[in-house]
Image: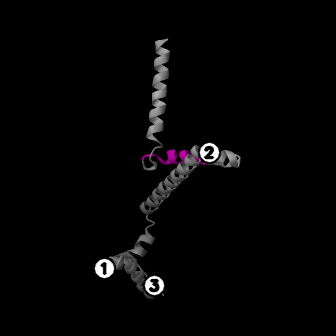
Amino acid sequence: MEIVVGIVIVFVILIVIGNIKGAPSPSSMSDAALVGRLQTENAWMNRYLRLPYENQQSDSLKKMYAEKTEYIKQIEQEIIKRQTAYQLAQGEAAITNELAPILERTQELMNEGKTEPEATAIALKEWHEKNK
């Protein structure tokens, strides 16, 4: 009997610790885990949105909806970041090469005392005039 009670207590402790810790950081997950987690979170969102409006209004569900929406955004950003890194690694850095002169000119202007928005606007204008 003590063994069963001990197993139940350990199980409850693990669940409580998991809930306290929260969802895993998207940056620490593999690509497959990211896709799986995104599908799971989207499935929860679909179930929530199919609930009658009155049921959607509970404070706990509204809080979970907001948290999950933010978490989905984080997962999507991580996927985009990884895709971009992969594309750059595959030699598709043409955009970076095109932006390099703009970024360099922006830095020069900032060193001369311009604010970042001003420097960026001037650098873009100069680049556009050169490449008409």
Q: Which residue is denoted by mark 2 in the rendering? A: 58
Give residue 58's position: percent from left, percent from top.
62, 45
Give residue 80's position: percent from left, percent from top.
49, 58
Classify residue 91 by image quadrant: bottom left
As drawn, 58 above or below 123: above
Say whether residue 111 is left or right of residue 53.
Answer: left
Q: Nearer the viewer, residue 101 or 66?
A: 66
> Which of labels 1 and 2 is toward the front?
2
Disc 1 marks a residue whose amino acid type is Glu
Task: Tell me what residue is drawn at x 49 percent, y 54 percent.
Answer: 74
> Which of labels 1 and 3 is toward the front?
1
Disc 3 marks a residue whose amino acid type is His
Classify residue 123 by image quadrant: bottom left
Q: Which residue is denoted by mark 3 in the rendering? A: 128
The stretch of residues the image draws in magenta is: 28-42
As drawn, 128 above or below 6: below
Q: Earlier in the sequence, mark 1 or mark 3?
A: 1
How far separated are the C-alphas under marks 1 and 3? 17 Å
Q: Which residue is denoted by mark 1 in the rendering? A: 108
Q: Which of marks 1 and 2 is nearer the N terminus?
A: 2
Task: Tell me what residue is drawn at x 29 percent, y 80 percent.
Answer: 113
Q: Is mark 3 on a helix, strand or loop?
A: helix
